[in-house]
Image: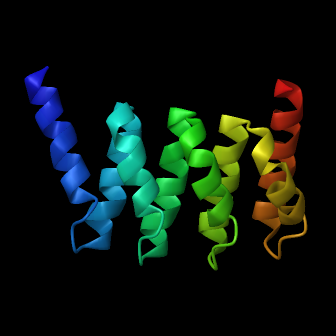
Amino acid sequence: MAEEHKRIGFLLEELKNEDWKVREDAAELLAEVGEPDAIEPLIEALDDEDWHVREAVALALGVFEDERAVEPLIKSMSDEKANVRYGAALSLSIVGDQRAVDVLLRATEDENPVVRKVAKVALKEIEIRQ
């Protein structure tokens, strides 16, 4: 158990690495591990300067299905990069929180067809859960 905790700590530190590829990998690995202590650091990483990292983080947050991620993911729906908006919409569909409905409705008109499609799927998922 202590060994696993060390690995989680290492991955959390890697979210701050200067190499975006390392930060991206750390986000993906934290999602695989599913460590609840990673939620807050991942939410912070949604503001990363690199869109690859923001996309990986947005996707990772869906794994946790934690309502703390809803508002930050909603904010990510206005990211300049379609990949990040896609990741946020996908995670919002997994979390299934009613607070995301308005932003997902707007996303059905997104310039990117993949974001539009995922937003529609997300809205259906939220409707099913109600």
Above or below for 34 versus 111: above
Image quarter hosting the C terminus? top right
Figure colour scheme:
rainbow
Q: Quadrant of residue 33?
A: top left
Camera sees residue 75: yes
Residue 18 percent coordinates (x, y): 22, 74
Above or below for 5 versus 120: above
Residue 7 percent coordinates (x, y): 16, 38
In terms of depth relative to the viewer, which is nearer, 98 or 7? 98
In terms of depth relative to the viewer, which is nearer, 113 or 41? 41
Camera sees residue 117: no
Indicate left or right for 127 with 98 as reference: right
Q: Residue at x 64, y 64 (%)?
A: 75
Q: Quadrant of residue 121?
A: top right
In terms of depth relative to the viewer, which is nearer, 57 or 115? 57
Above or below for 45 versus 41: below
Number of callouts in the render? 0
Indicate left or right for 123 with 29 as reference: right
Image quarter hosting the N terminus? top left
Question: Please, which residue is most extreme toward the top here?
Answer: 1
Q: Residue at x 9, y 28 (%)?
A: 3
Indicate left or right for 8 with 116 as reference: left
Residue 21 percent coordinates (x, y): 31, 67
